[in-house]
Amino acid sequence: MITSYTLLRILPAKDEEVFRKVKSYPEVKEVVLTYGEYDLIIKVESSSLEELDRFIFNKLRTTGGVEATTTLIEARPSKIVKGS
């Protein structure tokens, strides 16, 4: 399983529309609206790099309102558990 995080820049006034569309994609496991250089961060799970590539180029980048994307592929997962 390939886990990645894609940062999206959204055209002005399109953030809610893109948010709703992106969260409907089955590859997307989490969506967060943010302030700053990027407007959305999405967590994506794919079975292979080829599947991730298809998702980014054929689905995500063709979504209306998406201006730019940057994708980070998880190298080493780590779960932090805080004591109770």
Image (spheres, rainbow, N blue to C red):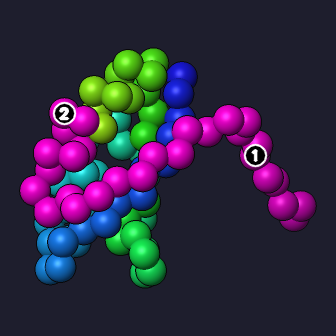
Please rate how many residues cluster around mark 1, counting C-alpha atoms within 10 Å: few if below 14, some from 14 to 19, many from 20.
Answer: few
Please rate how many residues cluster around mark 2, counting C-alpha atoms within 10 Å: few if below 14, some from 14 to 19, many from 20.
Answer: few
For the residue pair 14 and 25, the one nearer the viewer reads as 14
* Residue 37 located left or right of residue 73: left
Residue 59 located within the stretch drawn in magenta = yes
Q: Secondary structure at mark 2?
A: helix
Residue at left 14%, top 50%?
63
Vertical placement of residue 44 versus 36, above or below: above
Segment colored magenta: 57-84
Amino acid type, residue under disc 1 in the picture? Lys
Vertical placement of residue 73 versus 51, above or below: below
Residue 74 located within the stretch drawn in magenta = yes
Residue receiving disc 1: 79
Residue at left 14%, top 80%?
13
Q: Position of residue 1 (x, y in %)?
A: 54, 22
Amino acid type, residue under disc 2 in the picture? Asn
* Residue 13 located left or right of residue 37: left
Residue at left 34%, top 60%?
8
- The picture quadrant where one finds residue 28 is top left
- Are dots 2 and 1 in contact, CB under 8 Å? no
Q: Which mark is residue 58?
A: 2
Q: Secondary structure at mark 1?
A: loop
Q: Position of residue 50 (x, y in %)?
A: 38, 19
Quarter holding the C terminus is bottom right
Q: Position of residue 23 (x, y in %)?
A: 28, 52
Residue at left 73%, top 36%?
76
Q: Position of residue 46 (x, y in %)?
A: 43, 27
